[in-house]
Image: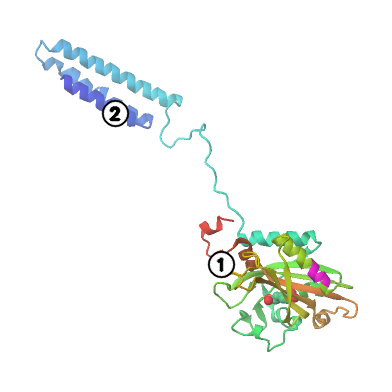
Amino acid sequence: MKEKLERLEQEALKALEAADNPQEVQLLRVRYVGRKGAVTQCLRSISTLPPAERPLAGKLANEVKTRLEAAFKDSIEAFDTGRKRPDGALDVTLPGRPLAGGRLHPITQITQAICEIFLRLGFEIVEGPDVELDYYNFEALNIPKDHPARDMQDTFYVSENIVLRTHTSPIQVRVMERQSPPVRIIAPGKAYRVDSDVSHTPMFHQVEGLMVAENISMGDLKGVLTIFVHQMFDEETSLRFRPSFFPFTEPSAEVDIRCVICRGKGCRVCSHTGWLEVLGAGMVHPAVFEMVGYDTGRYTGFAFGMGIERIAMLKYGIDDIRKFYENNIRFLEQF
Ligand code: DAH
């Protein structure tokens, strides 16, 4: 009898410890010290013991019952007063769980950084449609019908006269059509080409720039782009203008910056040349001005276009453009 009572008491206390809500404690109370509870039944069976054993067994059983009743009562009180809490209940005294904050995509961040620099220089930000007329994407930019950029391989055609814009340059034309000089705009946005490898994605981003007024020269272009590069990278990053060709500018240039990875010593990123091509630019071709009705005798202007992914890759040292669009949270969280 003594052993049985001791075992029951231990068992009950252990179960009580594990109970994590008051309902469970009630059930335990009934199971052990209720009318048909295990301890209660022990008490009842004392009358079946030999008379000599009864007083001691009775005392012990009563003690166990009293202790357990007290323990159950205490536990229910603990839940009632909040000293113990049901599983999953809100503990308002605990520190809050931090929310995993989102952030801007690295391309958005770089786009904003580029825009801020040009805004400080007095440029206005404009946008244009991604789905564009052939006229604005090609024709008005002096890109003739047989130009390779129109090739079915490069351009996403929506219909014969509608394309997904292959660059942000059509925005230049749209702005000049509705506004007379002076013009000072940049136009960030998406561009599309049938192309996909480590440095090309079918959708990518460009920023177009255009400044038109009287007496705008190549010197203004160099000045503005130099300020841009110095602010985007740093003051030590020098620029190089290489003669080039674009149908909508004359003269045209490709602009390189000193390799931001090796500082010009030559590395894998700059193909051991020490220079990185970052944008195309030039003086707006008179044929483009004629398309929008600008007086070519009075106005001159410069334009430029740069790939935002390219700038982001150089800024962050990323070697595969496709990483921007894989939605890998561990990649994106780094920016
Ligand atoms: N539109 C050209 C491209 O997609 C980039 C460009 C070059 C834009 C020269 C310009 C420019 O405005 O003057 O590659």
- Of residues 122 and 311, which is closer to you in this image? 311
Magenta-colored span: 219-223
Name the disc covering residue 286, or none.
none
Task: List x then y, in percent, for residue 126.
Answer: 75, 66
N-term mark: 1 or 2:
2
Q: Amino acid at mark 1?
A: Asp
Q: Quadrant of the C terminus?
A: bottom right
Q: What secondary structure prevails in the magenta region?
A: helix
Residue placed under numbered mark 1 in the picture: 319
- Of residues 208 and 238, which is closer to you in this image? 238
Q: Residue at x 83, y 69 (%)?
A: 183
Task: Tell me which corner region of the image, top left, top right, bottom left or bottom right, holds residue 104.
Answer: bottom right
Q: Residue at x 41, y 27 (%)?
A: 79
Q: Is residue 88 magenta?
A: no
What secondary structure is marked by label 1? loop
Q: Quadrant of the N terminus?
A: top left
Task: List x then y, in percent, for residue 315.
Answer: 63, 62
Q: Is residue 150 visible?
A: yes
Residue placed under numbered mark 2 in the picture: 14
**Classed neighbour count for the residue bearing mark 2: other residues with Cα under 10 Å, few (<14), some (14–19), many (≥20):** few
- Quadrant of the picture in which ligand 1 is shown: bottom right
Q: Residue at x 72, y 64 (%)?
A: 229
Task: List x then y, in percent, for residue 19.
Answer: 34, 31
Residue positioned most to the left: 50
Q: In the rendered structure, are the residues bearing label 1 and label 2 in contact, judged by CB atoms less than 8 Å apart?
A: no
Q: Residue at x 77, y 76 (%)?
A: 282
